[in-house]
Amino acid sequence: MNELFHYEIIIFWSEPDAAFIAEVPEFPGCAADGETYAQALENVQLVIMEWIEAARGMGRVIPEPRGRLMYA
């Protein structure tokens, strides 16, 4: 598996959005949605790559994967 995807991803159903939402807690603002659970996961994987690319372009530090978060 690509090391970019060693980050925790939380996926949940959002009634107001009528979609599954996938969030990456270690990357502020990194989230995606999808009509299905699988689509939300696929979409957030693309957003993770874009988030990392943008952060590197701005000279920001990329957080190390922490594994499972305590509150999840």
Image (cartoon, grey):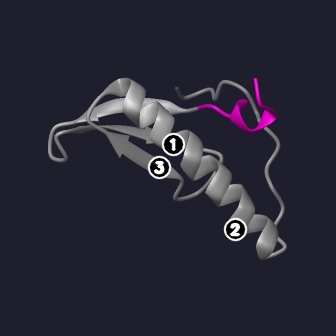
Q: x and y percent of residue 50 in the render?
A: 63, 58
Residue with the mark numbered 2: 54
Q: Position of residue 16 (x, y in %)?
A: 15, 46
Q: Which residue is mark 3?
A: 31
Give 17 or 53, whichever is nearer the viewer.
Answer: 53
Q: How many marks?
A: 3
Q: Secondary structure at mark 2?
A: helix
Which residue is drawn at the image coordinates 76% and 23% (left, top)? 1
Answer with mark 3 or mark 1, whichever residue precedes in sequence. Answer: 3
- Place residue 18 in its image quadrant: top left
CB atoms at circles 1 and 2 under 8 Å apart? Answer: no
Residue 9: x %, y % from top left: 55, 33
Label 3 crowding class (10 Å Cα cut-off): few <14, some 14-19, many 20+? Answer: many
Label 3 close to label 1 by CB (< 8 Å): yes
Cα distance between the residues tagged 1 and 2: 15 Å
Residue under the point 74% across and 39% down: 4
One can see residue 24 in this view: no
Instruction: Indicate the amino acid at tag 2.
Output: Ala
Q: Secondary structure at mark 1?
A: helix
The quarter of the picture where residue 53 lies is bottom right
Span highlighted in magenta in the image: 1-8
Q: Note whether 25 is above or below 61 in the view shown.
A: above
